[in-house]
Image: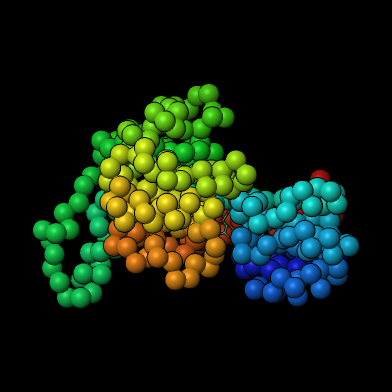
Amino acid sequence: MKIIVTDPIARQGIEILKASGLEVEEKPGIPPDELVKIIPDYDAIIVRSATKVTKPVIGAGNKLKVIGRAGVGLDNIDLKAAKDKGIKVLNTPAATSISVAELALGFMFAAARHIADATASMRQGKWEKKKLKGTELFGKTLGIIGLGRIGTELAKRADAMGMNVLIVDPYIKKCAVGEIRTLEQMLPKADYISIHVPLGDETYHMVNKAIFNKMKDGVIFVNASRGGIVDEDALYEACKSGKIGVAAIDVYEKEPLKDSPLYTLPNVIGTPHLGAQTKEGQIRAGIGVAEKVRDALLEKN
Ligand code: MLT
């Protein structure tokens, strides 16, 4: 049986598949029309977030039995089209939770201590000690929107650091750390807000102008979940006006991001979708997805 891998995954995952006698072809960055042409040859496809497994891809996949996603979000896969054709969609929901939570925490520290600005200033040979005075995270209030695996990891870490953690999640009745609040209750109270919800119809542009307006002035806003959850025009305006003190952004509605006005603003810091991009997280995700796809193809499950 043949598997196409269209985004880079850990070597360990590729080796697991090959060791089971499965044929693996790696075609990272394959153009969408090319993928539609060759997908009929494959029994499974493994992707991360860059490849869009669209209705045309699924429709053309006559032999396709499994779609493997090395990672968490399934927003790049047409789940309805897969379900209609009886194709299994398998992801690795826990593999990269700590990596993403640590990036969100890193953003919070970077914003509080001006790490990006300070580095840029040092590169220019300056010594701006007075200008770059920061704040502590200790004693501040963090609002976490979404208490899934990543939100939970972030809540534990923030709580251990002495932050007051407010959780917003309509699907959660109780939490081990922090206190549950409605969105309306949390927004004006939080010094830091971090989003950890999947992208779907319910969450598309859920953070918009009206939501930014309800936040505390100067809030530090973190998004390491999915770009489409935040209205980027509204984010730009909120940063420009100073409503948002610092926005720390890892994900964008259109990726790769090109020429975004966001990065013309001094109070936006960010990364190119690096949340899950750690050595440890990618090994877990690569091995996890390979084992699941192997078992599904060889009918061990
Ligand atoms: C995820 O959803 O796990 C990540 O966004 C995956 C990735 O970086 O490709």
Q: Which residue lies furthest to the right in this view?
A: 62
**Residue 13: x %, y % from top left:** 67, 62
Q: Total of numbered circles in the picture? A: 0
Residue at the spot x=80%, y=47% of the render?
83
Determine whether, in the image, residue 140 is placed left or right of residue 73.
Answer: left
Determine whether, in the image, residue 245 is placed left or right of residue 132.
Answer: right
Up-down: is 41 above or below 237?
Answer: below
Q: Which residue lies furthest to the top in this view?
A: 173
Residue at the spot x=10%, y=58% of the render?
130
In which quadrant of the rendered view does residue 202 lie?
A: top right
Q: Residue furthest left?
A: 130
One can see residue 168 in this view = yes
Determine whether, in the image, residue 213 is placed left or right of residue 208.
Answer: left
Ligand 1 occupies quarter: bottom right
**Residue 179: x %, y % from top left:** 41, 27
Residue at the spot x=73%, y=54% of the render?
78
Residue situated in front as seen by the camera: 288 or 4: 4
**Residue 189: x %, y % from top left:** 32, 33
Check the picture and name the quadrant holding the C terminus.
top right
The colour style of the image is rainbow
One can see residue 288 in this view = no
Check the picture and name the quadrant holding the N terminus.
bottom right
In which quadrant of the rendered view does residue 116 lie?
A: bottom left
**Residue 238: x %, y % from top left:** 35, 51
Residue at the spot x=64%, y=73% of the render?
29
